Image (cartoon, coloured by chain):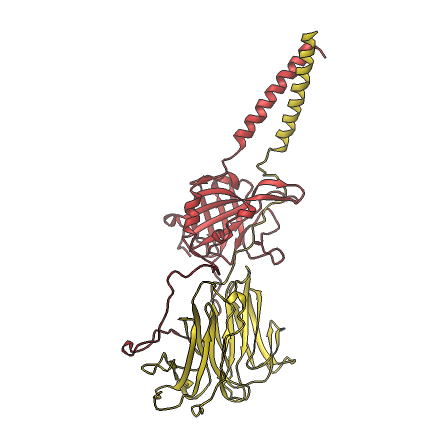
Chain colours: A yellow, B red
């Protein structure tokens, strides 16, 4: 993959953000970069931003590695990816320039990866950082590998079906450890990937399928975003009313009887004394 | 009815009224003991993101200058995270000497139907909210139990509303160690005013939070209108065994 030609990319814009992904009063966005293109020695790359060639913004990133998250002002950026050590002023980038618009409050992952046919490309994903209900966890799977359409199984049940490059599927499920499998869509085998995933409560786990099935370097990279959890809605701990701090029922009855007795005897006594 | 009988009835009625009033006043515990606000403040660090909270000091990492010799962007491997090694150390027992409580603790999560904390459907067990903090660790560790159940009578936390400042709470863990806590405060919250983000805070000073129901009771809904909440803090010097 070192021989990647220059690849022209259409503008990848972050549009139609989910409402929960936007922090209303922030003027910054959060960016993570994933290297998902296999190659010799992990295909190390230098990543430059906005044509500033004085030094790589991210030097020496290799296959399966994440850089970030970094907080950047919301703006338009141009990203160029070069083979590590290449002179950006004298050579064409291996990938890019890639125009990326980062809206305020967005949490995004920029990924260099293979398309279904095995050519280098790039995608920008907006990460859902909306609140996760108490007791649940968020699992997202992004198909960015040179591989056919797949199903994702959780504990042998279909969780996401017919997922194809470069698409994603996501869902909130009860926090637990799941046995995850990736199989050709509609099939149960061959299992092209299998792993036990411990998915913590209140955490978003994003699994990227990367590499090439045909070339034998298909694998996954995992990004986690913590701190999205919520508190339960209450604590229900009584149904009998034995510990109520209202007026206790026995005392209330005794009090009522005493009031009746008081009124009755008082009235009778006053009538007799007036006779 | 003779005049003397009427006089006796009058006197008995007056005495009964006085007795009823006195026993009500004597039998009523104060709703709050200790400094509830101080405990709430110690847990007030935001544990959960709030969409409207402005970032007072935005952290902007500019593209690096040449003299930096390299950028400050952190790099991490995308390898699958390891599964938790071995069994986690969790609370398994609770002792509240002042109430004579010595109860098993079971881990629970969320009732998927109601979204509320799950509490075992018996009056014997104390529930530990396993998605929150471990007792003695940072944040609020929540132990909840029934005050009563219509089908089973009074519960293990029936007298939680009488716990006093300074009472000692012991939590036993699955590895045999014991952590000791001192009650700092007790209060009652209307259920619709329960400070959930404080009570279930995952950051802040270590607080052991004991919860049951109390306050007024609705026969029609079969539920109380308040939660009794007891806040205790660790006394590390009195822990038994190596704290874990």
Q: Residue at x 37, y 69 (%)?
A: B60
Q: Nearer the viewer, residue A23 or B219?
A: A23
Q: Residue furthest top?
A: A275
Number of labels in the image equals: 0
Split into 4 quadrants, where in the image is the C terminus of chain B? bottom left
Relative horizontal placement of residue B30, taking residue B152 as reference (left or right): left
Q: Quadrant of the N terminus of chain B?
A: top right
x and y percentages locating residue B178 in the rendered image: 44, 51
Q: Nearer the viewer, residue B58 or B8?
A: B58
Given the current orientation, which residue lies at the most extreme right position?
B1
**Quadrant of the image occupied by residue A269:** top right
Quarter where residue A261 is shown:
top right
Residue situated in front as seen by the camera: B69 or A258: B69
Residue B170 position within the rendered picture, expressed as x and y whole percent measured from the top left: 45, 47
The answer to which image quadrant residue B17 occupies is: top right
Residue B81 sits above or below residue A245 on the image:
below
On the image, the x and y values in percent for residue B203 come to 43, 56
Image location (x, y in percent) of residue B101: 52, 43
Residue B5 visible in rendering: no
Q: Which of B130 and B72 lies nearest the eye of the viewer?
A: B72
């Amino acid at each position: 993959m070192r021989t990647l030609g220059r690849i022209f990319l259409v503008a990848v814009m972050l549009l139609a953000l989910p409402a929960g992904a936007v922090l209303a009063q922030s003027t910054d966005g959060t960016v993570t970069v994933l290297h998902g293109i296999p190659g010799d020695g992990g295909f190390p790359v230098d990543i430059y931003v906005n044509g500033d060639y004085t030094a790589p913004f991210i030097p020496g990133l290799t296959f399966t590695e994440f850089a970030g998250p970094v907080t950047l002002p919301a703006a338009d950026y141009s990203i160029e990816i070069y083979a590590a050590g290449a002179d950006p002023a004298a050579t064409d980038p291996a990938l890019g320039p890639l125009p990326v618009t980062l809206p305020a409050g967005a949490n995004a992952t920029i990924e260099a990866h293979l398309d279904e046919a095995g050519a280098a490309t790039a995608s920008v994903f907006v990460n859902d950082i909306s609140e996760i209900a108490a007791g649940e966890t968020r699992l997202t799977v992004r198909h960015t590998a040179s591989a056919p359409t797949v199903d994702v199984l959780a504990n042998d049940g279909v969780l996401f079906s017919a997922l194809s490059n470069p698409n994603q599927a996501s869902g909130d499920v009860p926090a637990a450890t799941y046995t995850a499998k990736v199989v050709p869509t509609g099939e149960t085998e061959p299992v092209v990937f299998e792993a036990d995933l411990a998915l913590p409560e209140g955490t978003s786990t994003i699994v990227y399928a990367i590499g090439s099935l045909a070339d034998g370097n298909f694998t996954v990279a995992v990004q986690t975003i913590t701190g999205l959890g919520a508190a339960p809605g209450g604590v229900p701990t009584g149904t009998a009313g034995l510990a109520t701090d209202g007026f206790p029922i026995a005392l209330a009855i005794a009090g009522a009887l005493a009031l009746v007795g008081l009124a009755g005897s008082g009235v009778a006594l006053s009538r007799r004394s007036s006779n | 009815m003779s005049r003397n009988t009427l006089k006796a009835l009058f006197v008995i009625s007056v005495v009964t009224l006085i007795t009823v009033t006195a026993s009500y006043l004597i039998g009523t515990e104060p709703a709050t003991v200790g400094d509830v606000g101080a405990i709430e403040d110690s847990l007030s660090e935001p544990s959960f993101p709030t969409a409207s909270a402005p970032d007072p000091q935005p952290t902007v990492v500019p593209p690096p200058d040449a003299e930096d010799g390299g950028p400050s962007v952190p790099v991490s491997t995308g390898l699958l995270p390891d599964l938790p090694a071995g069994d986690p150390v969790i609370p398994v027992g609770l002792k509240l000497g002042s109430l004579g409580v010595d109860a098993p603790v079971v881990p629970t999560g969320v009732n998927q139907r109601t979204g509320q904390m799950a509490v075992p459907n018996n009056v014997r067990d104390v529930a530990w909210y396993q998605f929150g903090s471990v007792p003695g660790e940072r944040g609020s560790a929540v132990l909840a139990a029934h005050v009563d159940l219509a089908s089973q009578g009074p519960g293990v936390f029936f007298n939680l509303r009488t716990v006093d400042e300074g009472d000692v709470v012991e939590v036993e863990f699955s590895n045999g160690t014991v952590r000791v806590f001192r009650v700092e405060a007790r209060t009652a919250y209307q259920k619709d005013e329960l400070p959930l983000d404080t009570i279930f805070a995952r950051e802040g000073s270590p607080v052991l939070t004991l919860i049951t129901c109390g306050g007024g009771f609705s026969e029609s809904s079969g539920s109380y209108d308040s939660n009794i909440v007891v806040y205790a803090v660790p006394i590390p010097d009195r822990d038994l065994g190596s704290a874990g």
